[in-house]
Every structure is written in structure tokens, then in C-alpha cells.
Amino acid sequence: MFSKVLIANRGEIAIRVIRACRELGVATVAVYSELDRDALHVRLADEAYSLGGQTAAESYLNTEAILDAIEKSGADGVHPGYGFFSENADFARAITERGVTFIGPRPEAIEVMGDKISAREAAEKVGVHGVPGSTEVLTDAAQVVAFGEDHGWPVAIKAAYGGGGRGMKVVNSADEAGDQLDSAQREALSYFGRDECYMERYLTKPRHVEVQILADTHGNCVYLGTRDCSAQRRHQKLIEEAPAAGIPDEIIAQMGEAAVAVAKGCDYVNAGTVEFLYEDGGFHYLEMNTRLQVEHPATELITGVDLVEQQLRVASGEALPFTQEDVEISGHAIEIRINAEDPAGGAFLPSPGPITTLKTPDGFGTRFDTGYESGDEISQFYDNLVGKLIVWGKDRPTAIARALRALGELTVEGVATTIPADIAILEHADFVANEHSTKWVEETLDLTGVGATPAADAAEDDAPKVKRDLDVEVNGKRFSVSMWVPESAAAAGGGAAPRPRRSGGGGGGGGAGSGEVAVPMQGTIVKVVVAIGDEVEIGDPIVVLEAMKMENNVNAEKAGTVTEVRVAEGDSVGGGDIVAVIE
């Protein structure tokens, strides 16, 4: 077993790994950006090292900074979590070349399966077939147009080195191909550090079913049931269930066997997930994620297997302690992702800012994984996952009832969240009857009038304090110290910078139809669509705003002529800022 593990990630997944290591007696090392200096994963780790920078590219995607932290800390293992470098073969190889263990698959397997294009080819070789698609890297929108005209619309453009819906765009017609390809490439580069994309036929009403696999270095590979991840928006999951309900046992077994075949076909080791689209009694291979999934806790609750513990044990050379025949599925689990987004009207707009209150639910069969506490901040530069509510029940109806009860106990203030939408999904007759698909949230679920929890101002600390616990860095290593300061300075907040308070409005400056185009949230302008003098109609895109790794079109609410453009690509803006004027 390892003596010290560095977690090359942040948020709840970093904390999940820290806790698993602690239970095994393994010391942990956190890394952090400037914005995460006071983050919960930093506070819980045994050691922490600064990466510098604010954005992911400047910090968690900075290979040299992470390698430097590995060397300074003396870590003998690195867990990548999910996202960032978790499916980056170059990063895994850079670690292993230094004699440090990458707690995940071999770099060669990541190269094959982490690249979704070669993954399709590898699956075909073992007789597992996907939906019609291209195995060529997209370089021009004309390729998308030709494929759509040949195979039919819509077409899905997907990040070759991505997952989780990031860098995925649906093209409904030839006219959309150019803009959607550009957007997919930008998102892929921002989130995964690479912009290669490919395409495939977009099925009309599938269910998204995935199979969790676990393989060791001794030739053993098992599948741990299925998960249904069909409740999605923007191709990113809202609610996941385990096991996938309503699918015949023989189809489930075929999926599991196909998943194992795909894993063995690329000599896969450690935890991974093989994803399928299920429609009309048949299933198609979608992709393999060469990492731990966000929704892994749902599988843990129905199997009793601690997946992170097994990751650590497998990476240290141990054999799996069970066979396929030993795997038993018990009850039903539901995982609900609580994202900092305003779901009102189905928009799901990112809502960065400080969490003024976070009170989590408890009770039988109830678990909450989070990377935040009250007072922590959701930054526009990172993923907007506040936490994951996971419940277990003896059957699906019990799990749904328990999830609704737990959501009623969950309090998140200061940022808008997806909780109202989660409740609407769980209570809907289609979901209860298991008749939803991957497009159901966006095409069927009515979120009209569904509002987010109003933001609450942080409570002021009335009592003066004279003792301050501070975090300092010495040669890039983090230490926690206590200092006594004058009472007057303490009462004024001396010794620690106050957390920024969230501005009241989220909607922006211009009223509907006023001609002033305002952005609804803070973020970065990644594309300016119009120029002064352009004629626009209501609903035409004016700029593309990136917030929390998602791109959002900011559209005209009035027809007319663009008389002012106040931003350029790369500009940072705040909620309510006017970016253009239409007269």
C-alpha cells in the first residue's frame, strides 16, 4: 500500500479520495489554485501545495506545477479524480516515468480508450458495436455537413479526449455545423486541454446506461451492475440511478459482458466505465471513461464495494478480493447532482458565488458528498457541482421517496441550485414510470415557474475575535498557524481577507426589450457574434459567454441595429454588465 498519495484534483472528489486514504492509513497531499487556497480539500489533507494561477489551465492543468508538488511532497501515488488530467495519457506517463504510481489505468489504455475515436475502433475489434459515426478528427464543418446529409440529422459532435457532456454539441442542420464545431472545440480545450473532436449519429430517444468495471493486474475483471444516467441537461447528468431499471436481465448481462470484453481488449486496469445507449430493446456502445465516474457512489450503495479503496489496492498490486459470481446487487440507489445553476424556465444558468448556508440531510440510506462548507465560494473558473446527494432504498419507489425527503432537508443559500428541477424530475409521472430518455428534461419536463432558492447575504460576525488561524506558504508548501492580533484589528477582520459578497442581481442591466444586452452571470466572453451596424432579430446570439466551463449564448431581446459592442473576446464580465446596445 502507498505511504503518501497526492490528489491531482479539487472539490468533492479530492475529499472522497482523502477519506479513503485516511481509512487505509495513507497520508494525503492536496494541491490548490489561488482561488482554492481555503478550500475544504486543502483543509482536510495532511499536506497541501500551491499550484498558483486561477483558471484550470493555470493550475490543475499545469503539469509542471503538479509534478513539482509530487517531488516536493515525496508522494508515491497520484490519484487524478475525474476531469482535468484523469484521462490524459501524457500526464499519467509523466508520473510513472518518475517512479510514482498513477492510480488509474496504464497510459497505453488511456491512449486507446481515453481517445473516443480509437475507443470506437477498439470496441469494434472485440465485437462491441456503436452508433454510426466517424473515426476521423474533425477539421472542418464540411465534414459534419457531409455526414449529416448521408446519415441524417441530428449529428453529435463530441470531444475526443472528453466526457461528462463537456465539449459535446448537437447539430440539427447544416447551417449550425460551423458554430457548433467551434463551440465544441473551445469547450474541449478549456476543460480537457485538447480540442480534437469527432462525430456520430445522435439517437432520438435513447436511455443512457453505463456499466462499472473493475480490473486488476492479475487478469481479473468484473462488472458491478449498471447505472441509468438518462436525466440530463446539455448532455450532462442531473440524476443517476443504479441499477438501470426496466431492462431485461439478459440484456443487462450482455451489457456487462460487453463492458468486460472492451476492458480486456485494451488490457485495462483499475476502475472504469463503459457506456451504452439503450433503445428499442437493443444497445449501442458509446464510449469508455478511463477513470472513476462522478456517479460511482450509486454503485457503491447497491454492491457494498468501496470503489476508491479498490482503486488504491489495485494500483498497489493487490488482486481483486471477489469474482463476478460474488457480485450481488441489493436494492436501488439514486444520486442527485446539486449544481450551482438556476433551472428557472429550463435555462440552467450557472450561478457562481459564495455559499452562505449549507445544511446537508441525514438519515437511513442517505449520503452527501461535497467539497464545500458554509462560507466557501463556487468559482466561475471551475465546475459548478456543489455536492452529490445519494440515497439507497430497498426498491426504486423507496429510493425516490427517500431522495425527495432528503432534498426537503437540504439547504443551500447564496447561490441558485438545481434542487427545484431535481424535485420536479423525481415527482414527474414519466420519471416514476421510468419512461424518460436523455432528451426528456429538455424536451418534455416543464420547468416554467420553477425558481431557484433566493440568494442570502452572509451573516455578519458580531463578536470581535483576537485569535486568528492563518494559512501560510513556505517555499510553496502550505502550513496552518495561529496568531494573536490586536482586538481592534480582529474586530475589523484583520489577519484574514474577508470573503467577497455576492451582488444581489443575477439577471443583468437591460430590461426585456430595452436594447441593452446584459450578461446574466459573471464569466468570460469567448466569442463576439455581432459587429456595429449589424441587423439582428429577437433571439439572435450577440456574444458567447463561458461560465463554469459551459458556454451560453447571450441573445438579443429586441430587433434592430447594433450600435455599440462593449466587449471583446477574452474579456471578463460580471452579472448584469452591458455587452452591446441595439437600437
Image (spheres, rainbow, N blue to C red):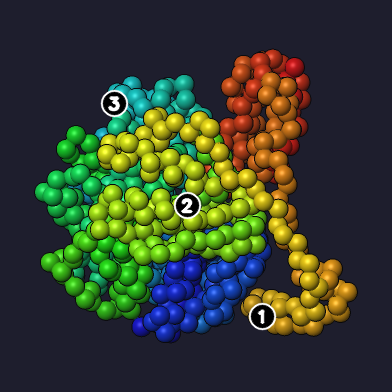
Residue position marked by numbered label 3 in the rendering: 151
Q: Nearer the viewer, residue 92 or 233?
A: 233
Amino acid under disc 3: His
Closer to the chain start, of discs 2 and 3, is 3
Name the residue at 18% across, 66% down. 327
Label 3 Cα crowd, 10 Å radius (few <14 / some 14-19 / many 20+): some
**What x and y, as percent, mark residue 256?**
18, 54
Give residue 186's position: percent from left, percent from top. 53, 42
Q: Are marks 2 and 3 in contact (CB under 8 Å)?
A: no
Q: Establish if 51 lies above or below 147.
A: below
* The N terminus - image quarter: bottom left
- Measured from the top left, where is residue 241 in percent x and y? 31, 51
Cα distance between the residues tagged 1 and 3: 60 Å
Q: Which residue is mark 1?
A: 480
Q: Nearer the viewer, mark 2 or mark 3?
A: 2
Q: Secondary structure at mark 3?
A: helix
Residue named by callout 2: 408
Residue under the image location 36 percent in, 70 percent down? 308
x, y percent for residue 471: 69, 76
